Image: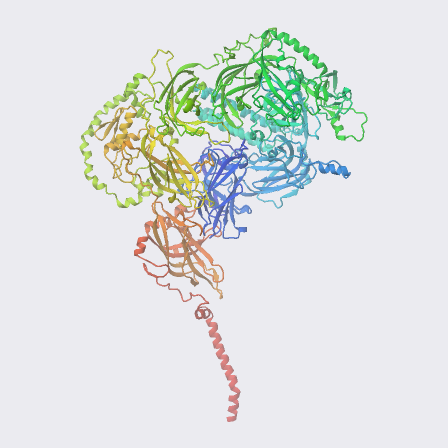
């Protein structure tokens, strides 16, 4: 990873990095101003490729899944502050964990791993934050944060392997952003989902130089800057009602009401990176004008990806509701400028749309509330908000919310200019309709326009007329629109942003073209086309791409469009990208050599195009189509507006604009997924067009096929009053003339044609379509149904009801036996009760009252009605067609005259015939209108005469505008015939408990559906059936149908005798259309993937064609004048087969089955499976194996080979699967199926037939062997030239023969060599070999110097290593299943079948000679006793089980019924334990073949938890030809670390190999050369020099071993096996490194096992004598004003942290301190690994000591002693005993630059105290509070390292205590001035007071004497004078 700088614009954002080389490999430079690393100059090689923006995580599932996020905090460097005690905290999605506190260091090393487990949906998890914070634990919490870093989980997930490995994070202070870097933190993070492999967090071997700069994760531009996101929030509109109208009603009653209020109180929330700010609340307002500025302060560039806008509704009592959520990806609003133009995040002014649950308000809780949180696809538009975002760098916001000034409000007006748009939709078919209880209508809306159930929007013809669904004669229902297809039109007003959407459409078209072309090339590669043809396809793809990328992006037209800054920037960015792609394509055309490489490059272009084909400012809401039944919204489909947008420029038209498309509606929300609803709500074929209202003649021009007609519509309502009969008067409950809902009054006479329109014709009755529809139209077979009705009074028994026989709608019909056959039909079978529905065993279903519906299969006492369905199939006989046609016409005309439909009440379902319960009836009237003036509105302004005052105003408003109905009418339909060729399916889901299904397929095509026969008990049914759909009537131009044929929907079901049939999945297909039946093209069978919800449900092999039926009477020119339809396919019984030419071509094929045995069979029906046999079925042929007597004694079959000679398809694509079924043979002849396996494809088992004559020719085979192939399978003949060469080498072989005697000689003096060198032994052990092989060279230097053997260390299981092929070379393991496929269930594996297959073609003539069998020379299938040795080396990243984030793991080995638990040797407090243990067991293979290594967590009180386990199949290793029983060592040694451990010697192994693989040899010529096959191997070629190891064995064995190494055999190795735990299936719980040796006892005893015990630490004692300190900074000021320090020295070994200190050198005035003080630090050290082992208890209550391996660092600190306050820290130095700087000899030459630093790492000469043993001199101490190191003193010390033994021989006391020797320390000679003042008053006087003030004292005394003398003189003078006078 080194050498690739990572910044936000590069690999973080998902492109491949630049390949670059460093100019200067020196250490990173630090910028003194910011403390940041200065990026080095890079020399660009070439730009591999990039995607300039971060990939967006799209289409993430909303289903909660197990996830694990692992974080490992390794170390920190350059944390700001000196002598701090750092601790790191990691927070992931509100779970926080912290590391240990490290003492007094600013470069702590933690090395701690944390596991965070989530059960969340991926969509939610990707937005959660990962935050790292480093605190100083010494300080108060408020100011203890040193620095932090955060990013979202999605950013980690987008990285390769979903992980950051060994990345440095730049820590910064989120509050004070200008302060630059606060330090660097090194971490690993990975996100693991089910089935992901966890990357290893082990340090990479080459990371010695650990380069921060190249692995730094920091935003681009050297440092994070403070920035402010300013969101200008102007207004919102169309916010749906959220509150109940209860209070309004109360106020109205009391008359205190003001005007009608809008029932929503919206406010807006803006959040990003965990911060949020909200606007003011606008009460009772659904179009709030907030006009506020919301600001969020961030660190820019940010590591978080999405801005979140939420509109919430304030509630007084309850929690605020969310109206809608909108996410805005940051990467669409800015560009890093890494490639192409860069810009800061900017957006708008533009509207953003909110989507969520349906808009209709109800007081009940909304079941789709989650959709408003932005989870899942919103099903309805919920308003929009006008916002603008700007980013300002370099400042954080003062206040989060302020008001927008008026200038801005005026400026934004121009962005709100609206234009009128029209949305047209024509519905051609609605099929597979699930709602059959009430009439169904479809509503089209854009935004809130066209929303029929919202009272605030003007009515418009946005819905189709309500129609009852009609049964299609097989299973589904459809709407019988026939030739009058409903159309809708929605007028709306939006801003004109066509330039944005057109640009998007252009890019989407480029992507579509490119994807289609890529698919073609892929098919070409799959079909193995010749290279020139592939190259041609590729060139045309590139030409097309270049041409597309040169197309001009649309520009905003001044005067029509208003564009903003982001539009301009996005356009520049897109142009730059397109230009780049176009240029790269030109280069690629000239330079591409390999198709696959070029395709990889093209895929990258596709990804770049997808990244730029996103429009952040799409303010035009999506078009939503709803299926409505009554007042209930059932299902929807959402289409982005740009896809149906019309444009004058054909390049910019939306891809679906005006085009016929098939939509599969969806149920809203996650309900369908949760409740496993399998049905399709409805399939629609529709055309949609959106464009400016003044351009809508483009839509009319498109409708060439039918005529658009507009009708006024009203319903005549009547009710039935006893005596009076039907009348309009009386209690109708709705107006006499009304709309279909009865909401508003629409009398016929009040309709006035709108301006610009006129009537054509008069009003006429237009009956509901389903009433006119003849149910069996277009069918050749039809299922008649009738219902037998029973009723009872409470307490009586069941008897026939008043209407004993009815149809499905409840209308009375004749009894079943007198149902008339229409003319031209015949019965196919008799009447049968339909038991395939939710009914009881007699077919009855029960309800309270038949008109109410709601039938259920369980009888309750309150049920008064019951019914059962009888069905009978009838078939059409050709000749009666004309008669039938006439009858239908007459019938229709009669019914149409009346046109009434009846119902008990208006809100119930209407039906065609009157029944006794019916109280109301209605009929529909239409009147056609013609448009005279283009573009005139077609809304009716109704004229009303005087209204009464008290009627509601709202109703007037609604009625004042009535919307007409629109239809697209077709003259006549074209007739088609569709043939569906259903051949077979494979890998279907299991629907029954046996693990099988009884599948049948049901096809639905437009108005018809049909069913295949059911196949019993199969997951791979072959139906081989043609279904013919006759007389399909399709309206519209056949050429349009050819271009865009309707889809065929195929659903698969599992037939169940009782209850409903279980859904197995569905798939769609498009038929090949033939307008001329003589068209010679043949449809090709292809596999269609079947899916059931999210799960994969297998594949269906089928083909479909749609023929236009020629019309006999058509004129020659017309389309219909084609020839006759092709003949019907051949029949088998009553069913049509798939015709030849479409069905696969067969050839005679051999399948050899190696039927070896079964393993691990689980109980079936509570008893063990002991006597199984296996049944193989392929292509309808079955072979059965013999029966195993007892699986407990020998689970292998005695006869192993079965042979199929069958006809199978020649093309691999059509090969039927191999079904493997295991049956158990039980008493009384029962043979239950106990397990099945479906082998989807036999392709991997294909081989060439073995030629008989070659198989005998021994020499023919070895050529393959020498080339490393597996003998016996591929026969390679050696070319003639090689043989000549071998002859030449004859004499050379002869030469070494003479020298043989000399080769025997070394045996004489080998004895001397065998005495191993005693020094070597200590440092050379098995671990040296292991570390040498893993590249950890610092742990095994001696071993590498000696150049001894290495081993293979595989990072995965041995089964996954390439050449082993999972050890399936002899036989493969197939898992057996049973039981149903349920999504949430654990795996249903119930055993394994061991065996293999070989498939090869046979000669077509049965008389030709058969090739010889492939499976020959099989090993014995009897059990073999073996010794198994399991070596477990170490564990990696175990999932912690204790709260401390650690575990106490130990090993448990399980093999068969043996169990070894190593609980006593558990490894305390570690998740990376070193086990170093070997376990030896004996076993019988294959009876006990599964070896389980389980890692458990030791707990004292509770039971031990399982951390994880892994299972190894020993049998596969034992049987494999690559000899996985015991890995081959590199050399043959008879002693030492690499002693031979196998039970047979290399020469014997080679002989066995040759025998097993039919290779001639080995022929030894003396001991120095050997011939194997046709190749001669010489020892001199392999060992040009004498072997290094003194313990090597004899020459012939060595030579044999060298030859074995050239063959595909397992070498000596260590494998890394992931551990899994059943509690969290699929999520790895850690790994173990281990290997297994298997020794069959029959081959003799094995060699001695390796000793892999973990390395033991040695005890050392570090003695440090602190002699003196010099130049220590003087920290204190004495009373007398001098600078001084009371110096003492403190020291400890970091990690052990037992501090020792010297005595205090008081009052040092010049920074010198004298100590002569000895520190003694005992510690344990592993010399071979150069680490110190520290064992200590984490807490006083801990049971065990935690073992840590740390660098042996010694910390020496100089302090200033204070008696009455905290001591002051002066300086520190930390020395690594392995790599410490040489001390300075003189104090003057001791400088800070002697110490290694991140900046000066490589320039300082470092020595190891373990080699030097003793050092003496001066070392600097420094302080780096400020972030730079300042020299604060020098310490003279002597360090000596002695082992414990030496320490006992030469004892020395601590400090100056006894024994004071080695060397003896004299008390320090400190200056007199050094003492503690208040303990030595005399010294204080002498040294402090006297010394400083002696002249004052002397002066004072002299003055005192003089004064005394004067005083005495004056005192005695008068007396003396008087005396003198007296005495005279």
* 419 sits left or right of 1830 in the view: right
Image quarter of the N terminus: top left
Location of residue 125 in the rendering, given as x and y in whole percent from the top left corner: 53, 37
- Residue extending farthest right: 946
Question: In which quadrant of the rendered view does residue 1719 lie?
Answer: bottom left
Residue 538 appears in the figure: no
Location of residue 272 in the rendering, given as x and y in whole percent from the top left corner: 58, 40
Question: In which quadrant of the rendered view does residue 402 lie?
Answer: top right
Residue 890 appears in the figure: yes
Which is nearer the eye, 280 or 1680?
280
* 645 sits left or right of 1891 in the view: right
| Residue 428 vertical placement versus 1567 (above, below) | above
Q: Residue at 49% across / 75% down in the picture?
A: 1900
* 148 sits left or right of 1705 in the view: right
Q: Residue at 22% across / 31% down in the picture?
A: 1567
- Residue extending farthest front: 796
Location of residue 21 in the rendering, given as x and y in whole percent from the top left corner: 43, 36
């Amino acid at each position: 990873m080194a050498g690739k700088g990572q910044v936000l614009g590069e690999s973080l954002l998902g492109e491949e990095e630049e390949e670059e080389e460093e100019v200067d490999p020196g250490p990173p430079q630090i910028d003194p101003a910011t403390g940041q690393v200065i990026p080095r100059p890079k020399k660009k090689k070439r730009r591999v490729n990039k995607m300039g923006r971060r990939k967006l995580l799209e289409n993430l599932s909303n289903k909660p899944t197990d996830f694990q996020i692992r974080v490992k905090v390794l170390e920190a460097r350059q944390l700001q502050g000196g002598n701090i005690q750092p601790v790191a905290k990691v927070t992931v999605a509100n779970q926080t964990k912290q590391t240990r506190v490290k003492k007094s260091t600013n470069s702590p090393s933690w090395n701690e791993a944390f596991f965070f487990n989530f059960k969340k949906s991926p969509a939610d998890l990707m937005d959660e934050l990962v935050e790292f914070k480093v605190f100083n634990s010494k300080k108060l919490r408020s100011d203890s944060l040193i620095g932090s870093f955060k990013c979202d989980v999605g950013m980690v997930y987008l990285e390769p392997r979903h992980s950051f490995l060994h990345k440095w994070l730049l820590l910064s202070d989120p509050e004070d952003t200008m302060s630059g870097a606060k330090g660097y933190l090194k971490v690993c993070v990975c996100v693991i989902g089910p089935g992901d492999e966890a990357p290893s967090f082990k340090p990479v071997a080459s990371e010695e130089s650990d380069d921060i700069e190249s692995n730094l994760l920091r935003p681009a531009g050297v440092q994070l800057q403070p920035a402010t996101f300013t969101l200008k929030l102007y207004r919102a509109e169309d916010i749906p009602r959220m509150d109940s109208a209860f209070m309004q009603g109360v106020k109205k009653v009391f008359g205190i009401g003001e005007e009608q209020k809008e029932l929503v109180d919206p406010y807006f929330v803006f959040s990003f990176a965990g911060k949020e700010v909200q606007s003011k609340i606008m009460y009772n307002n659904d179009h709030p004008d907030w006009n506020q500025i919301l600001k969020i302060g961030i660190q820019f560039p940010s590591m978080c990806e999405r801005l979140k806008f939420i509109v919430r509704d304030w509630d007084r009592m309850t929690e605020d509701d969310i109206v809608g959520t909108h996410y805005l990806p940051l990467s669409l609003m800015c560009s890093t400028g890494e490639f192409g133009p860069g810009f800061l995040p900017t957006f708008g002014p533009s509207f953003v749309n909110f989507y969520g649950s349906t808009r209709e308000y109800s007081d009940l809780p909304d079941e789709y509330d989650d959709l408003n949180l932005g989870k899942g696809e919103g099903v309805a538009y919920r308003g929009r908000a006008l916002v603008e975002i700007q980013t300002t760098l370099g400042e954080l916001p003062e206040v989060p919310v302020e008001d927008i000034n008026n200038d801005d409000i005026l400026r934004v007006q121009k962005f709100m200019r609206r234009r009128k748009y029209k949305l047209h939709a024509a519905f051609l078919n609605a099929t597979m309709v699930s709602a059959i209880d009430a009439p169904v209508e479809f509503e089209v809306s854009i935004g809130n326009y066209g929303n029929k159930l919202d009272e605030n929007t003007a009515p418009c013809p946005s819905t189709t007329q309500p129609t009852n669904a009609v049964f299609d004669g097989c299973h589904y229902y459809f709407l019988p629109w026939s030739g009058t297809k409903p159309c809708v039109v929605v007028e709306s007003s939006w801003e004109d942003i066509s330039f944005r959407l057109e640009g998007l459409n252009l890019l989407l078209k480029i992507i579509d073209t490119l994807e289609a072309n890529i698919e073609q090339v892929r098919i070409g590669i799959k079909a193995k086309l010749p290279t020139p043809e592939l190259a041609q396809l590729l060139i045309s793809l590139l030409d097309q791409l270049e041409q597309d990328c040169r197309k001009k992006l649309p520009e905003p037209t001044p005067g029509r469009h208003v564009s903003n800054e982001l539009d301009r920037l996005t356009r520049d960015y897109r142009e730059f990208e397109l230009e780049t792609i176009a240029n790269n394509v030109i280069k690629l055309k000239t330079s591409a050599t390999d198709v696959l490489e070029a395709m990889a490059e093209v895929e990258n272009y596709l990804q770049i195009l997808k990244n730029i084909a996103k429009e952040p400012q799409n303010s035009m809401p999506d078009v939503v189509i709803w299926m409505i039944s009554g007042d209930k919204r059932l299902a929807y489909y959402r289409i982005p507006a740009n896809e149906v947008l019309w444009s004058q420029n054909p390049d910019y038209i939306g891809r679906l604009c005006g085009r016929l498309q098939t939509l599969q509606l969806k149920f809203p929300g996650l309900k369908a997924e949760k409740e496993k609803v399998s049905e399709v709500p409805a399939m629609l074929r529709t055309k949609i067009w959106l464009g400016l209202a003044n351009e809508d003649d483009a839509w009319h021009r498109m409708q060439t096929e039918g005529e658009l007609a507009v009708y006024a519509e009203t319903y005549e309502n009547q009710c039935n009053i006893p005596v009076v009969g039907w009348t309009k008067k009386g209690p109708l409950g709705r107006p006499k003339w009304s709309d279909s809902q009865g909401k508003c009054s629409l009398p016929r006479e009040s309709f006035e044609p709108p301006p610009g329109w006129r009537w054509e014709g008069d009003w006429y009755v237009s009956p509901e379509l389903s009433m006119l529809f003849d149910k069996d139209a277009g069918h050749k077979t039809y299922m008649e149904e009738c219902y037998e009705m029973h009723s009872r009074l409470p307490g009586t028994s069941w008897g026939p009801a008043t209407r004993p026989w009815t149809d499905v709608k409840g209308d009375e019909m004749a009894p079943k036996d007198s149902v008339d056959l229409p003319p031209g039909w015949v019965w196919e079978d008799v009447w049968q009760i339909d038991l395939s529905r939710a009914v009881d065993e007699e077919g009855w279903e029960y309800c309270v009252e038949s008109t109410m519906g709601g039938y259920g299969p369980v009888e309750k006492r309150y049920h008064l009605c019951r019914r059962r369905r009888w069905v009978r199939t009838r078939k059409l006989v050709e000749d009666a067609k004309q008669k039938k046609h006439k009858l239908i016409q007459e019938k229709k005309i009669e019914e149409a005259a009346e046109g009434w439909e009846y119902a008990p009440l208006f809100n119930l379902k209407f039906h065609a015939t009157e029944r006794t319960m019916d109280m109301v009836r209605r009929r529909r009237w239409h009147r056609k209108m013609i448009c005279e003036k283009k573009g005139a509105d077609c809304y009716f302004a109704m004229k009303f005469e005087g209204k009464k005052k008290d009627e509601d105003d709202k109703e007037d408003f609604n009625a004042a505008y009535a919307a007409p109905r629109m239809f697209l009418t077709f003259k006549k339909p074209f007739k088609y015939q569709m043939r569906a060729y259903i051949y077979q399916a494979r890998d279907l889901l299991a629907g029954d408990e046996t693990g099988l299904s009884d599948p049948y397929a049901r096809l639905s095509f437009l108005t018809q559906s049909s069913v295949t026969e059911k196949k019993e008990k199969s997951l791979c049914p072959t139906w081989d059936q043609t279904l013919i759909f006759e007389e399909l009537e399709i309206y519209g131009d056949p050429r349009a149908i050819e271009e865009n044929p309707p889809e065929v929907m195929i659903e698969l079901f599992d037939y169940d005798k009782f209850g409903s049939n279980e859904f197995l999945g569905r798939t769609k297909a498009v038929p090949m259309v033939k307008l001329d039946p003589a068209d010679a093209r043949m449809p090709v069978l292809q596999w269609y993937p079947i899916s059931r919800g999210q799960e994969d449900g297998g594949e269906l092999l089928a083909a479909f064609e749609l023929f236009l039926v020629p019309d006999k009477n058509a004129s020659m020119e017309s389309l219909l004048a084609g020839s006759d339809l092709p003949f019907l396919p051949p029949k088998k019984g009553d069913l049509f087969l798939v015709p030849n030419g479409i069905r696969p071509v067969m050839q005679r094929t051999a399948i050899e089955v190696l039927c070896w045995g079964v393993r691990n069979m689980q109980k079936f029906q509570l008893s063990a499976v002991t006597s199984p046999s296996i049944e193989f079925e392929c292509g309808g042929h079955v072979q059965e194996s013999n029966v195993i007597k007892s699986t407990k004694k020998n689970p292998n079959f005695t006869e192993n080979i079965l042979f199929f000679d069958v006809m199978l398809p020649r093309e691999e694509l059509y090969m039927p699967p191999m079904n493997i079924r295991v049956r158990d043979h039980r008493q009384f002849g029962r043979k239950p199926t106990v397990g099945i396996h479906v082998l989807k494809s036999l392709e991997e088992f294909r081989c060439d037939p073995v030629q008989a004559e070659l198989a005998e020719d021994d020499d023919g085979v070895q050529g393959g062997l020498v080339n490393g192939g597996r003998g016996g399978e591929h026969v390679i003949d050696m070319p003639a030239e090689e043989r000549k060469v071998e002859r030449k080498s004859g004499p050379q072989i002869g030469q070494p023969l003479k020298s043989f005697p000399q080769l025997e000689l070394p045996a004489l003096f080998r004895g001397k060599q065998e005495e191993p060198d005693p020094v070597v032994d200590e440092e050379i052990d098995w671990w040296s070999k292991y570390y040498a092989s893993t590249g950890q060279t610092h742990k095994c230097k001696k071993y590498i110097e000696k150049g001894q053997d290495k081993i293979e260390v595989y990072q995965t299981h041995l089964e996954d290593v390439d050449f082993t092929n999972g050890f399936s070379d002899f036989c493969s393991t197939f898992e057996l299943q049973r039981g149903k496929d349920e999504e949430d269930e654990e795996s249903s594996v119930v055993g394994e079948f061991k065996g293999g297959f070989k498939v090869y073609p046979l000669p077509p003539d049965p008389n030709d000679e058969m090739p010889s069998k492939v499976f020959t020379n099989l090993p014995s299938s009897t059990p073999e006793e073996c010794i198994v040795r399991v070596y477990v080396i170490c564990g990696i990243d175990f999932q912690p089980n204790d709260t401390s984030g650690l575990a106490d793991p130990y090993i448990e080995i399980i093999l068969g019924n043996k169990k070894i638990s190593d609980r006593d040797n558990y490894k305390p407090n570690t998740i990376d334990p070193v086990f170093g243990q070997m376990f030896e067991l004996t076993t019988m293979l294959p009876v006990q073949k599964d070896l389980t290594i389980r890692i458990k967590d030791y707990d004292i009180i509770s039971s031990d938890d399982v951390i994880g386990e892994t299972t190894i199949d020993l049998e596969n290793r034992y049987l494999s030809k690559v000899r996985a029983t015991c890995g081959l060592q590199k050399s043959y040694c008879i002693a030492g670390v690499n002693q031979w451990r196998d039970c047979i010697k290399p020469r014997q192994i080679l002989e066995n190999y040759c025998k097993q693989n039919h290779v001639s040899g080995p022929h030894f010529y003396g001991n120095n050369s050997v011939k194997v096959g046709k190749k001669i191997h010489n020892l001199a070629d392999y060992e040009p020099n004498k072997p290094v190891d003194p313990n090597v064995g004899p020459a012939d064995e060595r030579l044999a071993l060298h030859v074995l190494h050239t063959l595909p055999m397992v070498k000596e190795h260590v494998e890394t096996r992931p551990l899994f735990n059943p509690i969290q299936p699929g999520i790895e719980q850690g790994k173990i490194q281990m290997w297994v040796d298997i020794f069959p006892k029959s081959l003799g005893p094995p060699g001695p096992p390796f000793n892999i015990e973990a390395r033991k630490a040695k005890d050392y004692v570090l003695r440090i004598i602190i002699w003196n300190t010099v130049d220590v900074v003087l920290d204190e000021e004495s009373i007398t004003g001098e600078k001084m320090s009371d110096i003492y020295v403190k020291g400890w070994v970091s990690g052990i942290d037992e501090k020792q200190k010297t005595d205090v050198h008081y009052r040092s005035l010049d920074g010198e301190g004298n100590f002569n003080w000895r520190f003694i630090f005992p510690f344990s050290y592993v010399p071979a690994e150069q680490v110190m082992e520290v064992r200590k208890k984490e807490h006083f209550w801990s049971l065990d000591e935690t073992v840590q391996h740390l660098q042996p660092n010694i910390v020496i600190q100089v302090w200033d002693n204070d008696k009455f306050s905290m001591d002051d820290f002066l300086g520190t130095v930390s020395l690594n005993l392995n790599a410490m700087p040489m001390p300075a000899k003189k104090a003057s030459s001791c400088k800070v630059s002697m110490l290694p630093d991140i900046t000066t790492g490589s320039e300082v000469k470092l020595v190891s105290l373990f080699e030097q043993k003793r050092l003496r001199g001066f070392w600097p101490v420094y302080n780096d509070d400020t972030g730079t190191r300042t020299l604060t003193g020098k310490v003279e010390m002597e360090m000596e390292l002695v082992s414990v033994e030496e320490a006992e021989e030469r004892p020395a006391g601590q400090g100056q205590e006894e024994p004071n020797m080695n060397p003896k320390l004299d008390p320090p000679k400190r200056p007199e001035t050094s003492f503690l003042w208040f303990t030595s008053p005399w010294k204080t006087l002498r040294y402090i007071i006297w010394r400083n003030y002696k002249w004052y004292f002397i002066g004072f005394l002299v003055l005192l004497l003089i004064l005394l003398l004067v005083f005495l003189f004056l005192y005695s003078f008068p007396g003396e004078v008087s005396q003198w006078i007296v005495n005279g």
